[in-house]
Image: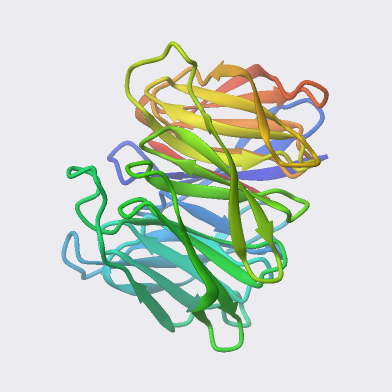
């Protein structure tokens, strides 16, 4: 059985934009299917129907550093080919993160530089309507260089799609919203928000498949916060904070991504600087983590990685060394075995169908 994998790249001269590979889920063989010209497709999100791919985008005619946007592409399920549906603009600079909700009703952009989260309604054809909601953030944190103002870094929805969580690196806050799919808005929840440790810098998060736990990756502290999650209210309660780096490591801390294996048994996170994937086992009763070890990503700055829906394969994108690495996941131990390398320029995001 094969699936398609999409690689989104930063806007560099030697990149062709979006790259599509086929992946044999049994053997791990990968083959380049084609490329799609696109500027600034550094983050991707796949519609739950598997028929539309959403990307960051540059908007023609906009001044550099001003209005960016998001694009929608139709996916040919037979060939993996992409055809452009439409591109919509943002009110200020382009978002750094894009995520479609669990039922394909809303697409969210998080804008690190302009301190807002933005909502776009999804049209019947999978394209994007004009933005329908903006949440603007204020505040700062103790790190004067990185937390001089609010820096929302991602938006993720809960497994039942009722709530959306916005991680704000600049203010050490995770905001909890109700996901209003009828009016295409984020509505502040009664619970409100949680604060991480000062200077931790929450970046991304991942829900456990059971819906009972949330794992918040703190970029600047290189820690994972483990939270009990109340699906009826969206409330979070911290139960553990664990380091993503070895105890004897004392250099740069720059964590980037966190994912839970589809079976819920393992959590993985990436460390830039240490250039590794950290591996943790999950206590099914409490959601708490136990460190298993680290696997080198065989490149520089693993800004993103992803796990295929069957849980057999992990691909790490080393953005600054132009290589992506495929690992086989051991279903018993959770450990990773390197199997092959791909040359992809400035890859910043991996998305599986």
Q: Position of residue 271 (x, y in %)?
A: 45, 28
Whether residue 21 can be seen here: no
Q: Quadrant of residue 61?
A: bottom left
| Badge count | 0
How is this picture coloured?
rainbow
Instruction: Please tell me which residue is depicted at 49% across the width and 42% down the height of the picture.
Output: 217
Q: Quadrant of residue 309?
A: top right
Against 270, residue 148 (above or below) is below
Against 79, residue 231 (above or below) is below
**In front of the other: 150 or 106:** 150
Instruction: Please tell me which residue is depicted at 55% across the width and 25% down the height of the picture.
Output: 277
Judged left or right of residue 131, residue 48 is: right
Instruction: Please tell me which residue is depicted at 63% across the width and 64% down the height of the picture.
Output: 47
Judged left or right of residue 111, residue 328 is: right
Q: Position of residue 329 (x, y in %)?
A: 73, 26
Instruction: Please tell me which residue is depicted at 40% across the width and 39% down the height of the picture.
Output: 219
Q: Position of residue 258 (x, y in %)?
A: 56, 40
Judged left or right of residue 183, residue 69 is: left
Against 170, residue 249 (above or below) is above
Q: Considering the image in quadrants, where does the N terminus appear?
A: top right
Q: Which residue extends farthest top?
A: 248
Q: Position of residue 323 (x, y in %)?
A: 46, 26
**In front of the other: 72 or 266:** 266
Whether residue 160 can be seen here: yes
């Amino acid at each position: 059985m094969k699936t398609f994998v999409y690689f989104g790249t930063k806007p560099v001269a030697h990149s062709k934009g979006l790259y599509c590979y086929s992946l044999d889920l049994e053997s791990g063989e990968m083959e380049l299917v084609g490329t799609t010209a696109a500027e600034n497709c550094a983050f991707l999100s796949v519609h739950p129907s598997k028929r539309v791919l959403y990307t960051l985008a540059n908007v023609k005619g906009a001044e550099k550093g001003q209005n960016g946007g998001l694009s929608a592409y139709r996916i040919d399920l037979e060939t993996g080919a992409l055809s452009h549906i439409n591109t919509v603009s943002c009110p200020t600079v382009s978002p750094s993160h894009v995520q479609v909700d669990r039922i394909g009703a809303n697409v969210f952009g998080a804008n690190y530089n302009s301190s807002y989260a933005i909502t776009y309604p999804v049209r019947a054809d999978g394209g994007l309507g004009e933005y329908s909601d903006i949440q603007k953030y204020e505040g700062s944190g103790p790190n004067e260089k990185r937390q001089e103002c609010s820096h929302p870094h991602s938006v993720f929805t809960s497994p039942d799609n009722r709530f959306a969580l916005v991680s704000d690196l600049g203010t050490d806050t995770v905001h909890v919203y109700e996901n209003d799919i009828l009016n295409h808005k984020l509505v502040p929840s009664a619970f409100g928000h949680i604060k991480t440790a000062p200077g931790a810098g929450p970046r991304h998060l991942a829900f456990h498949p059971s819906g009972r736990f949330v794992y918040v990756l703190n970029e600047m502290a290189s820690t994972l916060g483990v939270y009990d999650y109340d699906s009826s209210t969206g409330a979070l309660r911290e139960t553990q904070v664990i380091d993503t780096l070895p105890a004897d490591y004392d250099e740069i801390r720059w964590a980037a991504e966190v994912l839970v294996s589809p079976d819920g048994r393992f959590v993985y996170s990436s460390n830039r600087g240490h250039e590794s994937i950290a591996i943790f086992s999950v206590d099914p009763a409490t959601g708490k983590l136990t460190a298993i070890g680290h696997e080198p990503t065989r490149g520089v700055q693993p800004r993103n990685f992803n796990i295929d829906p069957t849980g057999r394969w992990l691909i790490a994108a080393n953005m600054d060394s132009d290589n992506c690495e495929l690992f086989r996941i051991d279903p018993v131990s959770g450990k990773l075995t390197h199997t092959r390398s791909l040359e992809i320029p400035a890859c910043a995001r991996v998305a599986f169908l």
